[in-house]
Image: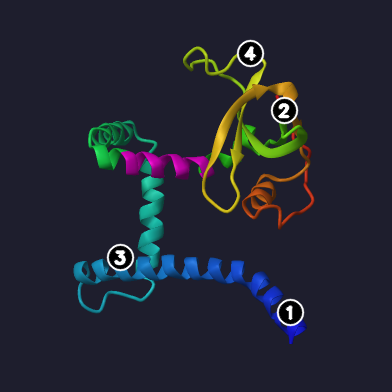
Amino acid sequence: MKRLGNIMFQGLVAMLPALLTLYILFWLVSSAETVLGGLLKLLLPAGWYIPGMGILAGLVVTFLCGLALNAFLVRRLLGLGEKLADSIPLVKNLYGSLKDFIGFFAKQKESQFNQVVTLDLEFGGKPMRMIGFVTRSDFSGLPEGIGTEGEIAVYLPLSYQIGGCTVIVPRSSVTPVNISTHRAMGFVVTGGMTADKGQNASTVP
């Protein structure tokens, strides 16, 4: 029975990520169909609505929003909206946190964040290494004292939670790791329970 339970647990672990991904996609599609589809039913003449038009409308709206963000007037309005949000205490904290969180993952495709490194530390007289991600190597334009020539910013994520810390260290204190960004993040978040071979060795600028 113990072996049977282990096999079932392994199967659950293998299927759960795929099932959760499918569920989230299904939820997004069904939500777009329900909300936008219901709106189209009100706007279109009777009999004109075809199932699936809500999903199509969601794709069109998303594409148009992406185009609009490139327009100067829209960017100006968004900037004014952010200034207004920053003036409201509760909204400021919530909006700023969500924006930073989403922007963090959106910027993972940038070349600097693709650099996975280990940071050499010492704890209780014993050497240890922490896995981190290089987020900045140029501190020009920032207030004096944050970083200097020869230093880099390294983000150190925490296991089993959304969080971490950013440290400014010399380039010589980190070692590039031959592993992809998402695999390294998975390794850290799960406390080292998952791992995979890297693809291309990262280089520290």
Question: Which stretch appears magenta?
Answer: 93-105
Does residue 80 sit above or below 131 in this rendering?
above
Residue 53 seen by the camera:
no
- Return the residue at label 2: 204
The answer to the question of whether label 2 and label 1 lie on touching residues, with beta carbons closer than 8 A, is no
In this rendering, position of residue 126 left or right of residue 67 = right
The answer to the question of whether label 3 and label 4 lie on touching residues, with beta carbons closer than 8 A, is no
Mark earlier in primary sequence (3, 4): 3
For badge 1, the amino acid type reads Ile
Disc number placed over residue 149 in the picture, else none: 4
User: What residue lies at 49% left-to-right and 66% top-to-bottom?
Assistant: 25
Is 90 magenta? The answer is no
Q: Quadrant of the N terminus?
A: bottom right
User: What residue lies at 30% left-to-right and 38% top-to-bottom?
Assistant: 92
Q: Secondary structure at mark 4?
A: loop
- Return the residue at label 3: 36
For badge 2, the amino acid type reads Val
Mark earlier in primary sequence (3, 2): 3
- Return the residue at label 1: 7
Mark earlier in primary sequence (2, 4): 4
Mark earlier in primary sequence (1, 4): 1
Q: Secondary structure at mark 2?
A: loop
Q: Quadrant of the C terminus?
A: top right
Nearer to us: label 3 or label 4: 4
- Label 3 neighbourhood size at 10 Å, few (<14), some (14-19), many (20+)? many
